[in-house]
């Protein structure tokens, strides 16, 4: 056997290192005995290369391409690598146990636990442990004040890991390295390593070990960050071979789009253009830095245009609806079926008409707790059946079990929730959703196991175990398998490093976004990092992190072979101008880039815009049925029509129901008006004082409307009370022995319609004369508008009440007064010949007759218009639109029409 | 480097002291700042990383960075340093400082920064919760507070413009924080006068001094009345304050005119009543009377503070004030740290210092070192009082510097506006409260002004409404006149004005509707910056209706809305028909037949889309729920540019990471809508639009032509019941316990007076900023009004707007020598320019959507193909979607691993058998299987001792457990062959089976043929023999590999790929179903 060779291939990005290495691999494969292996950093990269090799016809087993993680598995044996989320948990526990006083303010902060975990990992990768933080020369620094505590906590975490048999990545690598040293590499004779930017000290040790047992060829890009690794390898006896030959430069284009949306549209437009010119989708890739705002826009836009795309990104596990559903179920059970928690659960169940009705019913009943109170509501039956299936959960609340047992039980939980109904022929998005759901459930079970390991072995209540599960779930990510071939690849700059595609788009090139800026680590500052180098441990500083960023940028822009499109948005979402990335500007300065226009684009819809019809009911039969429906009408309905035909149509004809109001809004204006009316009516009938009556009515109303107690309800109560007291003090129109409250009326106008209503109070005066009083729970300032409405042809109440006095109560109408009661009291109205200090007595009986006649005319005109199918939005008082619940649907547009009309006149 | 003026140069190079540069509008302050930076780097050798530049906005920071990088374009080394130099806003600086020192600061290192709107929402919610909690704990206290304070009962119903208790607390709390005053340190109310000693001298004058003689009978009676009143008051002096005090002091009906002139009593009464002494005494009384409640208020503020901080901590978030507070306390409390931070910056440059608030200034004070601070600002442009910016801070800095002998630099040469405009500004702002007197000067070489660059438009009308309408229409018309006719100076030189060269600057957004209507009437497109009307725009409303329907169609208002919108386009008649048939949402389930065939089709299509998207409502981000409907209806086709931009903005908003599920997401959006602060989207092509923006937003911008309309409109005074000022502490407007009228306590009164004064100054400065935005032309306009605002009065006075008013434009000459045009129309403008323009829309490229493409995978596994041919549905559930056996409701634990390709177990085996099978396979592959059970050993030996096993021993070439990935052309095939070998010229393929049964199903044969195809590529030829070896029975079953068989195997692969394309995976009911893990679970089959 020839002596193992040690070869280091270096060169700038896109100088053909990978090509050289694959050639070497091909030669090894052609030798044909399966003793070569290619090791790469990520699984997608490994898959990508396996596919490439298969298509190239390389007679290599797919197992010959491995991630580093998988490659060392045979030697790492049972040394399990701790997942990131669990590492944070371990750090959190060590912190809890040790509780250094200096960290007390940070003890419960999840970001601090994560920061501890990542420092621990960093230290391990650098080849040292927590103990390194106690190096004496670090003490001289100001930031060193926390180091003893930090070292103690991290050492605690290291111990915990050791006793649980868990390993950090670095320690697993080390275990593998020593096993290799001891046992050799089996039959493996050649190892190729590609795609690493640089190597940590532990990785370098592993490579050195490999090189003692096999021929090793490794590629390293030429950049400052790889220098330490390069030197190490050279010292370890590697021969360096530089690739200088840069491959053909692609055409390079820069596009400044208006904003992010346009930038994404532009990428899509160019993809379609390339496709039309015969390019396959899988020959194109989009590179962005991080997920940020680009991913959702790309997903939506590519999907919309029918461009198949594969996204090489993980999603947070907690964002998957089925996980939300499971979490909501546990939360609801743990909160003793709190109704708000039930709403959360209901909203995450697969939708159905029954659940729609149940949601509104439940919203009406908020707040509350427990299931029993809900059983009386038929609308909730189906929902409660689903909840009842979760009853084991409720029973578990009182138990204490060991974490492993909890994990087992909770793994069964998804079975208690409704399963999806899976059909074939489903649209792509649905297929994707089902696939995601399946993957999420698997990940959930893994998270449970992880949580069980992290939670130790002592029995604990469900709530406590669940907290751990949630931490693990929150820290977990999900990658959903997507195996499609002819897809545009969308990836992060990190992922892009080993790809080479004919067409590459690099987007989001604004300053600070790509390349990113890095700040110093909050636990271990740059100065300390530099100081630690004296002890031989290399931890990356923020400046070095920025060098990495810049290198990522250089890599990303070197991935294309035919066409590279660089782009950035000129304005952010808030409309502020952005600054293009300085790295891009540097490229522009260096020349060779073409600036291209970003044309305004539209996406062709399935059809041209729909023509909507003008609002009107034309059909005779429909009109007749509408007229029939309003044959008996109340004065307030008439006034509603006069204010706006559409709002009348929506409320009184269609009778549309909206969402139930928020609990705090249940005591709305009309509810309060009703309470005040009832109290006033009652106080006329009994000797009870108004406060007592009010408190009774108020609490009844709150009960029936389910208004929760709180300061707001109290404020409204006090205002109503103050208003009623003000009314009691007011002696303008004292009720007499002949006052009657709440008198209903029903009478037909000659020629229709029939009018129905109720009068708040009728005071009888000698000579069978009647004064009608109507209370309004409104501020006195609003009364004027109400009175003038009778002049402006939008109010009929006064006239109708006067008519009712005559028609239904056989009294001579002598006056009608409106009384505004809110904090203050004010009266206004018309009367003739009555001894009153308020109202407009001077206008006399003729005005009363006019009011009645005007009301009759208006009502008849109104019912005619209703019967004629008039329903357009036409507010008599546009200011009232702000309070109208149909404002979003009536389509009244504040167009230039009134202004133009004004100008023309 | 561009040439600087002498004054600019002096400021740039000043050393040995702090620099205070007072730079008027248009005087090139950013230029000076950039030059200062360069000078420090180049002449003083300061590394860019050691110069901290603080700006007021992100935009300004970006602009400075851009200019600096531009300057160093040719010097790569310096350029990289400059790129990384700390140029940022105060907030960004604090955020970085805290992120890097989170441990010292005691905050989460991964903290998020809440944006203003989110922080405000959280604060309001917290305030509600705190008050509710207080109500639960001590309802009587809440009742007392509500009764005592002049607050509105609620703001929940859009009924009141007055703040309620929750809002009032929030306002006071915010003011307190920005003043740098923690809740624990609220200053005590100003001590000083007590009400008794205030009143005593007056009471003495009334009571003690005998009345002059010779009073008329009327006077005698009145004097007696007054004495009686004074007597009652005096009696109260010693009593504890109660309602009667307010009653008596409020009973001030004595008629002053009926008191004898010049009498002591009359003088005293005059002072008490007219000079406000009585009111002051009542105010003092209120403060005493409500002292216990004041304590409650402070406690409520403390609870709010605690709860709000907890809330933020729970979500690891900081608001903007937290950033400043935390940075301040970090610097303040840790001396060594402060020294370190200070010493890391040689110089600090700060822009727009006049916009600094006290908290920010505190921070600056901690950071700066003597002689190394360079501050640029203009007290006359301080307009962010509502954000608690205080121009006094800059003035204080300047005064201190100059008192200590430092030079103050100032730049008053304005390079922006025409000289006549500068003259007009100088004329308007002579002796104006809040404006420092500095005349703006044109550059020395400017030509004399003979133009008429100023226009005054004073619109008259019957009432304010009609005058305002006249004003708006004339303004719109004037824009049309100027478009293309006026020659303006721009960066690209002189050219006819475009709409984008013009800006309308308004004081408040309330005037926008009127202006928008007029602009629309005159076909003037506009670009609205700011305002809060985004959610009210039509497409946004329509989109929300659809999303609400998806969330829950029982919301019939939304459903009816979407049905009648152009998203669906049903007629009202059809909707009425649907509604007559029952609940509206029933129409979505099974759409009924409608008489109108168009509607019938529209409803059917809509219902199908609804059915498709509803199950995905939480899985897809809302934008992906919206787009299909937009495309299906062609909705965007009917929208104007602005509406399309708004829709795009909504889509972007829907993509933000926000809470799921959809219903919650919609609640979040509606609370954003309620906050009314979301501005409309900028249209993509804004070159053909007039800018419409508030004066605040115009800060730092310039436009060739500027309109400042609605000058008559004043601002509303706030009626906040609580007021905080650092000087006077917490003040309240209580209710007079006797009559319920509002009565301010002294702290409130003082703070309110100070605020009113400050407000007047701020208004003047706003107007100053607005006027100085103009380069070539300035149009000031207002409507005739009975009570015009101060700025309108000033314009009237300065520009002699008085009778007789010219109905046609006339040119006037101001006494300062410049000309202006005055126009006072009485009616609407003529129609000549109404709607007559046709502006060419910018060209758009139409993108076609592709039909659904191939969805086939790049690889298939052998077992997948076998599984598919056994039952497509099982393949679909198991492999394609990845539903594991044991997933919800599946009947039995399954038997197929999810990871295809390697080590795949056979098709029908139970779990224990799988493990056993794996062990046997490993044994047969020659691996040491530690502690393999005897059963496994036995099974392995069955093969080893068989004739086939013997042949394998003799093989010239052999591979065991050979994983492969081979190219079949249309797809890559992966799998693992148990054994293949060459022996005696034969290529033999073997697959072990640990099943009990024998006979080999069709699936096994298919599997073998696929292996054969793979082997053809691996070994270079097809196997000559393929054997299924049953380990339990020792039987070797030969599988046919005829061309036809192999062809069928390939066809099976193709069928699978086609099924993937179509997502067509039919059921294959058979006896095997009962052994399928999906039976009676995810599979709907019934046997
Ligand atoms: S918002 Fe105005 S126009 Fe629309 S329905 Fe309501 S009242 Fe009518």
Image (cartoon, rainbow, N blue to C red):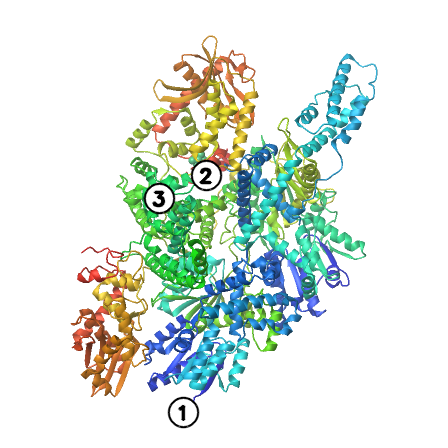
Rate crowding at label 1 as few (under 14), some (14 to 19) or many (20 or more) other CA atoms within 10 Å: few
Rate crowding at label 3 as few (under 14), some (14 to 19) or many (20 or more) other CA atoms within 10 Å: many
Label 2 close to label 1 by CB (< 8 Å): no
Q: Circle 2 sits in a helix, a strand or a loop, which is it?
A: helix
Residue picked out by circle 1: A2
Q: Position of residue B491 (x, y in %)?
A: 60, 58
Q: Position of residue A777 (x, y in %)?
A: 50, 27
Classify the position of ligand 1 by quadrant: top left, top right, bottom left or bottom right: top left
Tags 3 and 2 both on a single chain: yes
Q: Is residue B83 left or right of residue A412?
A: right
Tags 2 and 1 both on a single chain: yes
> Which quadrant is home to the N terminus of chain B?
bottom right
How far separated are the C-alphas under marks 3 and 2? Answer: 19 Å
Q: Chain of mark 3?
A: A
How far separated are the C-alphas under marks 2 and 1? Answer: 82 Å
Residue picked out by circle 2: A663
How far separated are the C-alphas under marks 1 and 3? Answer: 75 Å
């Amino acid at each position: 056997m020839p002596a193992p060779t040690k070869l280091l291939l270096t060169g700038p990005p896109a100088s053909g290192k990978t090509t050289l290495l694959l050639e070497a691999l091909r030669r090894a494969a052609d030798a044909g005995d399966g003793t070569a292996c290619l090791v790469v950093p990520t699984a997608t990269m490994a898959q990508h290369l396996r596919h490439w090799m298969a298509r190239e016809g390389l007679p290599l087993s797919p197992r010959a391409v491995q991630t580093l993680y998988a490659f060392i598995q045979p030697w790492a044996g049972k040394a399990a690598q701790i997942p990131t989320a669990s590492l944070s948990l371990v750090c959190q526990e060590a912190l809890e146990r040790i509780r250094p006083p200096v960290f007390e303010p940070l003890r419960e902060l999840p970001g601090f636990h994560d920061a501890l975990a990542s420092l621990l990992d960093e230290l391990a990768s650098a080849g040292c442990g927590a103990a390194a933080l106690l190096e004496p020369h670090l003490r001289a620094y100001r930031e060193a004040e926390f180091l003893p505590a930090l070292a103690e906590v991290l050492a605690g975490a290291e111990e915990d890991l050791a006793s649980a048999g868990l390993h950090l990545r670095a320690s697993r690598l080390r275990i593998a390295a020593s096993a290799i040293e001891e046992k050799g590499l089996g039959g493996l004779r050649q190892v190729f390593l590609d795609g690493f930017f640089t190597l940590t000290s532990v990785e370098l040790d592993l490579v050195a070990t490999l090189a003692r047992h096999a021929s090793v060829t490794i590629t390293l890009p030429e950049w400052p960050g790889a220098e330490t690794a390069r030197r190490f390898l050279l010292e370890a006896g590697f021969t360096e071979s530089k690739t200088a030959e840069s491959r053909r430069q692609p055409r390079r284009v820069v596009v400044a789009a208006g904003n992010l949306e346009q930038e994404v549209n532009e990428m899509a437009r160019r993809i379609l253009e390339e496709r039309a010119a015969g390019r396959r989708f899988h020959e194109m890739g989009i590179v962005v830095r991080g997920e940020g705002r680009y991913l959702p826009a790309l997903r939506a836009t590519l999907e919309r245009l029918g461009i198949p795309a594969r996204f090489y990104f993980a999603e947070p596990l907690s964002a998957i609806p089925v996980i939300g559903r499971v979490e909501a179920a546990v939360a609801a059970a743990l909160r003793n079926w709190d109704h708000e928690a039930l709403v959360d659960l209901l909203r995450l169940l697969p939708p159905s008409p029954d659940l729609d009705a149940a949601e509104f019913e439940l919203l009406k009943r908020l707040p509350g707790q427990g299931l029993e109170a809900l059983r009386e509501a038929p609308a909730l039956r189906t929902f409660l059946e689903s909840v009842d299936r979760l009853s084991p959960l409720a029973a578990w609340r009182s138990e204490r079990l060991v974490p492993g047992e909890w994990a087992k039980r909770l793994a069964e939980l998804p079975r208690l929730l409704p399963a999806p109904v899976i059909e074939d022929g489903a649209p792509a998005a649905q297929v994707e959703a089902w696939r995601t759901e399946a993957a999420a459930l698997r990940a959930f079970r893994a998270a449970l196991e992880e949580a069980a390991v992290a939670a130790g072995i002592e029995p604990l209540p469900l709530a406590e175990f669940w907290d751990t599960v949630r931490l693990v779930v929150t820290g977990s990510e999900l990658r959903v398998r997507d195996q499609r071939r002819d897809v545009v690849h969308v990836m992060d700059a990190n992922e892009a490093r080993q790809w080479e595609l004919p067409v590459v788009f690099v987007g989001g090139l604004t300053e600070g976004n790509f390349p990113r800026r890095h700040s110093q680590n909050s636990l271990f500052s740059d100065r300390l990092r530099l100081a630690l180098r004296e002890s031989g441990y290399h931890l990356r500083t923020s400046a070095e992190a920025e060098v990495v960023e810049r290198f990522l940028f250089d890599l990303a822009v070197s991935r294309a072979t035919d066409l590279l499109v660089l782009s950035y948005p000129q304005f952010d979402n808030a409309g502020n101008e952005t600054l293009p990335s300085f790295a891009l500007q540097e490229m522009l300065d260096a020349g060779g880039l073409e600036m291209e226009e970003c044309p305004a684009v539209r996406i062709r819809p399935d059809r041209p815009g729909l023509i909507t019809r003008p609002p009107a009911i034309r059909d005779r039969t429909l009109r007749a049925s509408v007229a029939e429906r309003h044959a008996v009408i109340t004065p307030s309905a008439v006034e509603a029509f006069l204010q706006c035909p559409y709002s009348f149509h929506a409320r009184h004809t269609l009778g549309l129901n909206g969402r139930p109001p928020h609990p705090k809004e249940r005591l709305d204006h009309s509810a309060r008006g009703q309470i005040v009316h009832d109290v006033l009516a009652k106080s006329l009938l009994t000797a009870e004082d108004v406060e007592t009556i009010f408190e009774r009515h108020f609490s009844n109303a709150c009960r029936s409307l389910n208004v929760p107690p709180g300061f707001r309800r109290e404020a409204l109560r006090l205002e109503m009370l103050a208003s009623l007291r003000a009314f009691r003090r007011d002696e303008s129109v004292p009720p007499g022995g002949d006052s009657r409250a709440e008198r209903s009326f029903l009478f037909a106008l000659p020629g229709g319609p029939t009018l129905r209503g109720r009068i708040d109070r009728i005071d009888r005066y000698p000579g069978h004369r009647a004064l009608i009083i109507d209370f309004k729970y409104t501020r006195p300032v609003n009364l004027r508008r109400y009175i003038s409405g009778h002049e402006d042809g939008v109010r009929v109440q006064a006239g109708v009440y006067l008519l009712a006095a005559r028609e239904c109560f056989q009294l001579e109408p002598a006056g009608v007064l409106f009384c505004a009661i809110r904090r203050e009291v004010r009266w206004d109205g018309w009367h003739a010949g009555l001894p009153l200090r308020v109202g407009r007595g001077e206008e006399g009986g003729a005005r009363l007759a006019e009011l009645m006649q005007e009301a009759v005319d208006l009502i008849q005109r109104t019912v005619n218009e209703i019967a004629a199918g008039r329903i357009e939005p036409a507010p008599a008082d546009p200011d009232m639109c702000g309070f109208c619940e149909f404002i979003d649907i009536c389509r009244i547009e504040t167009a230039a029409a009134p202004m133009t009309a004004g100008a023309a006149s | 480097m561009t040439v600087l003026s002498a004054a600019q140069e002096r400021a740039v190079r000043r050393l040995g002291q702090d620099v205070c540069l007072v730079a008027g509008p248009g005087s090139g302050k950013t230029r000076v700042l950039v030059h200062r930076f360069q000078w420090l780097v180049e002449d003083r050798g300061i590394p860019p990383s050691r110069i901290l530049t603080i700006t007021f906005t992100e935009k300004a920071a970006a602009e400075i960075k851009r200019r600096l990088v531009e300057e160093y374009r040719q010097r790569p080394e310096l350029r990289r340093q400059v790129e990384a130099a700390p140029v940022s806003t105060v907030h960004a600086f604090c955020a970085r400082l805290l992120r890097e020192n989170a441990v010292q600061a005691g905050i989460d290192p991964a903290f998020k920064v809440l944006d203003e709107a989110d922080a405000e929402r959280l604060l309001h919610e917290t305030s509600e919760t705190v008050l509710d909690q207080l109500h639960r704990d001590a309802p009587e206290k809440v009742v007392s507070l509500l009764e005592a304070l002049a607050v509105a009962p609620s703001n929940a119903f859009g009924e009141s413009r007055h703040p309620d208790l929750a809002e009032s607390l929030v306002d006071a709390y915010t003011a307190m924080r920005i003043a740098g005053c923690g809740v624990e340190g609220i200053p005590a109310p100003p001590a000083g006068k007590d009400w008794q000693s205030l009143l005593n001298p007056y009471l003495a004058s009334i009571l003690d001094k005998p009345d002059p003689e010779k009073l008329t009978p009327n006077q005698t009676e009145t004097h007696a009345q007054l004495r009686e009143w004074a007597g009652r008051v005096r009696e109260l002096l010693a009593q504890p304050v109660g309602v009667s005090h307010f009653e008596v002091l409020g009973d001030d009906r004595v008629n002053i005119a009926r008191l004898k002139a010049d009498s002591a009593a009359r003088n005293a009464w005059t002072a008490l009543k007219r000079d406000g002494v009585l009111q002051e005494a009542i105010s003092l009384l209120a403060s005493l009377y409500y002292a216990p409640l004041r304590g409650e208020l402070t406690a409520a503020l403390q609870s709010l503070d605690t709860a709000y901080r907890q809330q933020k901590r729970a979500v690891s978030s900081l608001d903007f004030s937290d950033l400043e507070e935390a940075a301040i306390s970090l610097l303040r409390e840790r001396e060594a740290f402060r020294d370190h931070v200070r010493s890391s910056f040689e110089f600090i440059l700060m822009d727009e210092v006049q916009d600094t608030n006290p908290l920010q200034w505190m921070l600056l004070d901690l950071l700066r070192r003597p002689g190394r601070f360079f501050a640029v600002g203009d007290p006359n442009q301080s307009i962010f009082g509502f954000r608690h910016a205080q121009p006094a801070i800059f003035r204080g800095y300047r005064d201190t510097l100059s008192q200590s002998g430092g030079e103050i630099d100032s730049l008053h040469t304005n390079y922006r506006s025409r000289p006549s405009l500068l003259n007009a500004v100088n004329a308007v702002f002579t002796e104006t409260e809040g404006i420092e007197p500095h005349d703006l000067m044109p550059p020395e070489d400017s030509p004399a002004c003979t133009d008429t660059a100023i226009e005054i438009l004073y619109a008259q009308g019957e009432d304010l409404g009609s005058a305002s309408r006249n004003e708006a229409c004339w303004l719109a018309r004037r824009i049309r006149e100027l478009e293309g006719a006026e020659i303006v100076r721009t960066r690209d030189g002189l050219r006819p004005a475009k709409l984008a060269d013009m800006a309308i600057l308004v004081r408040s957004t309330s005037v926008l509707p009127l202006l928008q209507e007029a602009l629309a009437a005159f076909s003037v497109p506009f670009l609205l910056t700011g305002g809060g009307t985004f959610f009210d725009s039509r497409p946004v409303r329509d989109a929300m209706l659809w999303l609400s329907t998806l969330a829950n169609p029982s919301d019939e208002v939304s459903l009816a809305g979407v049905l009648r919108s152009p998203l669906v386009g049903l007629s009202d008649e059809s909707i009425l028909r649907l509604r007559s048939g029952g609940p509206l949402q029933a129409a979505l389930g099974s759409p009924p037949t409608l008489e109108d065939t168009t509607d019938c089709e529209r409803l059917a299509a809509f219902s199908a889309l609804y059915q498709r998207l509803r199950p995905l409502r939480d899985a897809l981000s809302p934008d992906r729920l919206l787009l299909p409907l937009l495309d299906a209806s062609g909705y965007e086709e009917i929208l104007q540019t602005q509406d399309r931009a708004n829709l795009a903005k909504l889509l972007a908003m829907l993509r933000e990471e926000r809470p799921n599920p959809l219903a919650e997401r919609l609640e979040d959006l509606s609370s954003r809508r309620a906050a009314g602060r979301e501005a409309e989207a900028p249209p993509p092509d804004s070159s053909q639009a007039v800018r419409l923006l508030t004066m605040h937003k115009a800060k730092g911008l310039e436009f060739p032509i500027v309109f400042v309309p609605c000058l008559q409109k004043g601002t509303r005074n706030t009626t906040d019941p609580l007021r905080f000022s650092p000087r006077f502490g917490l003040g309240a407007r209580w209710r007079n316990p006797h009559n319920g009228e509002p009565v301010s306590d002294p702290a409130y009164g003082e703070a309110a007076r100070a605020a009113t004064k400050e407000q007047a100054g701020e208004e003047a400065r706003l107007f100053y900023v607005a006027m100085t935005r103009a380069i070539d032309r300035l149009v000031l306009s207002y409507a005739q009004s009975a009570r015009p605002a101060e700025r309108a009065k000033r314009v009237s006075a300065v520009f002699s707007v008085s009778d007789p008013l010219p109905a046609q434009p006339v040119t006037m000459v101001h006494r300062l020598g410049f000309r202006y045009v005055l126009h006072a129309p009485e009616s609407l403008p003529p129609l000549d320019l109404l709607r007559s323009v046709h502006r060419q829309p910018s060209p758009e490229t139409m993108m076609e959507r592709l039909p659904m493409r191939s969805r086939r995978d790049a690889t298939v596994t052998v077992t997948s193909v076998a599984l598919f041919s056994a039952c497509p549905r099982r393949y679909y559930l198991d492999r394609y979607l990845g539903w594991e056996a044991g997933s919800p409701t599946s009947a039995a634990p399954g038997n197929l691993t999810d990871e295809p390709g390697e080590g795949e177990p056979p098709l029908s085996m139970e779990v224990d058998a799988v493990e056993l099978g794996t062990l046997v396979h490993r044994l047969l592959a020659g691996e040491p299987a530690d502690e393999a059970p005897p059963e496994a050993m036995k099974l392995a030996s069955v093969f080893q001792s068989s004739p086939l096993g013997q042949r394998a021993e003799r093989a010239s070439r052999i591979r065991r457990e050979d994983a492969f990935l081979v190219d079949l052309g249309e797809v890559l095939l992966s799998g693992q062959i148990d054994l293949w070998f060459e022996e005696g010229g034969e290529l033999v393929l073997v697959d072990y089976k640990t099943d009990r049964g024998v006979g080999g199903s069709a699936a096994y044969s298919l599997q073998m043929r696929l292996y054969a195809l793979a082997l053809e590529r691996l070994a270079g030829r097809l196997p000559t023999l393929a054997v299924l070896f049953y380990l339990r029975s020792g039987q070797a079953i030969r599988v046919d590999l005829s061309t036809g068989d192999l062809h069928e195997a390939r066809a099976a692969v193709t069928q699978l790929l086609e099924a993937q394309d179509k997502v067509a995976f039919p059921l294959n009911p058979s006896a095997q179903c009962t052994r399928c893990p999906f039976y009676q679970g995810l599979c709907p089959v019934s046997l």
